[in-house]
Structures are given as C-alpha cells and as structure tokens.
Image (spheres, rainbow, N blue to C red):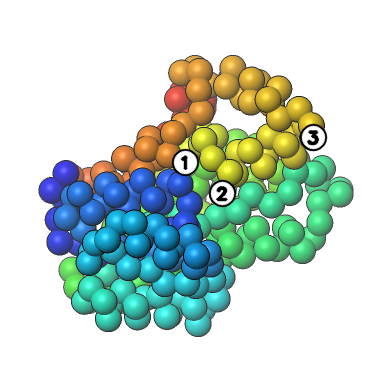
Amino acid sequence: MMGVQGKVVILTGGAGDIAQVATTNLLVGGASVLLVDRDGDRLAAFCGGLDSPAVAYCVADVTSETDTAAYVKAALDKFGGIDVLLANAGIEGQVAPVADYDTEVFRQVLEVNVTGPFLGIKAVYPHMAANGGGSIVITSSIAGLRGSSGLAAYNASKHAVIGLMRSVAAEGGPHNIRVNTINPSPVEGRMIRSLEEGNMPGAPDEVRELLEASIPLGRYAAPTDVANLMLFLAGEESSFLSGSVYSVDGGMNA
C-alpha cells in the first residue's frame, strides 16, 4: 500500500508479535516507525535484525506522562514529524471473579490499557493538528464489545478505549485527525496463552478448543490479521474512516 509512504508512525507495545508484523508492513509501505515498549532488549534485537534507517525505538512506560513526552520527542527528533499513532500497548491482568480481583491489578490494567492511549493521544494531537492531520488507531478487543467472566479489568479497559476513540474522533475531525479502534478476537501469542491458563489452570488446551469453537472461522487470529488492518487504517486508503470500531474476529461477534 502506498498510503503510508513517507509517514512517520509511533507504535506502542512495539516488542509484541502484532507490532513486529505491523512494523514490517509499514516499512515495506515506505513509512518510518518508532517502536515503544518497556522491553528494551527485545526492541533492540528486533530493530537490529531489520537493519533499516527507517526504524528506531524508545524504551518507555506508556503510563508515564514524562516517558510519553520522551517518545514523542524521539519521533520528532529522529524522523521530523508524527503522522500516525498506533496505540497498541496492553496487558491482560488476572483471571478472577470480581469479588476476588486484586484492586492493584485492576488499576494497573486500566493505567496501561486506557491511560496509556490517552497520554499518547494527548501528546501527539497538537503535532498532528498543526501539520494537517493524522491517524490514531487504538488496539481494543472483542472484550470491548461483550462481557466475559473473570476479566473485569480487561473488559472494562477495552470498552473504555472505544469511548475515548469516539470522543477524540469527534474532536479531531476539524483537524483531519482520524481515530478508530481495532477489536481482535483471541490472537495467537503470549497473551492468549496466559488467559487460557488463567481460565483453566493446567488445562489450557481445553480453553483453546472452546474458544476456537466459538469462532465461525474456527481459529484464532494471526498477528498478521491484525497488522494488516493497522496498515490500512494508518494509510490514505482509509482517509474517510473515523470514529469506528473494526473487528478482526473471524465472525466471533456476529
């Protein structure tokens, strides 16, 4: 896609599987990418393997306003602008009934999954508005469209970022700032392994079978499935799309 040619993209949660596929897509499309994550070792290894002047990284905690300002400055210093924010950092928390849910874990999930995107949007918004617009994509989840037992914090956070997206989309329209969410079903990788084990300790494969049976296409999403939609929403091909929720769920929420 030529829609990201020349664009500068900040991608949080940059050490994860989805982000790494998305980065490769963006580089092929001609974008420059700043990856953000707390896992500096994995960021360094990934960026070193790419060996491209169009990718860089910043070790940062998305829940920190100071760290957020630092990664925005890093993008401006390295690439000269900011056209796209892919607010992708997220954690799952624990699996527990609400009466037993650890309050500090609840707060941490909301800090990463909601405050993180808020701070990122707050920091990039003035730069996008001053430079003719941009695209913001928040990674939500199918858990933002429905409820599920044992995931009070995760469900609450993924619902919340849809509200954040809609508010900023309404506010950003006059500045040509587009905002959307991507809402995946379970995606192959570390997070779903953690949730499988949390739902049924010692028998995660049984959870996987139940979840896959609930997806009409009969499988989990691959990181590529999500990354491809990120690429589309980041680029000019989606220039009239804003304020919307885009499911990548194999029909799970049909």
The image shows residue 75 at horizontal and vertical percentages of: 31, 74
User: What residue did someone put label 3 on?
Assistant: 201
Residue located at (42% from left, 60% from top) = 45
State the CA–CA distance, disc 3 to disc 2.
Answer: 24 Å
- Residue nearest the viewer, comparing 5 with 45: 45
Select label 3 or label 2 by which is in front. Answer: 3
Using residue 62 as the reference point, say whether residue 194 is left or right of it: right
User: Relative to 220, does residue 165 appear above or below in the rendering?
Assistant: below
Element type at marker 3? loop
* Residues at marks 2 and 1 touching, judged by CB atoms closer than 8 Å: yes
- Residue nearest the viewer, comparing 32 with 231: 32
State the CA–CA distance, disc 2 to disc 1.
Answer: 9 Å
Q: Amino acid at mark 2?
A: Lys
Q: Quadrant of residue 95?
A: top right
User: What residue did someone put label 1 on?
Assistant: 183
Q: Earlier in the sequence, mark 1 or mark 3?
A: 1
Q: Quadrant of residue 186?
A: top right
User: What residue did someone put label 2 on?
Assistant: 158
- Tell me the tag on residue 143: none
Q: Amino acid at mark 1?
A: Asn
Residue located at (60% from left, 53% from top) = 91
- Residue nearest the viewer, comparing 99 with 201: 201
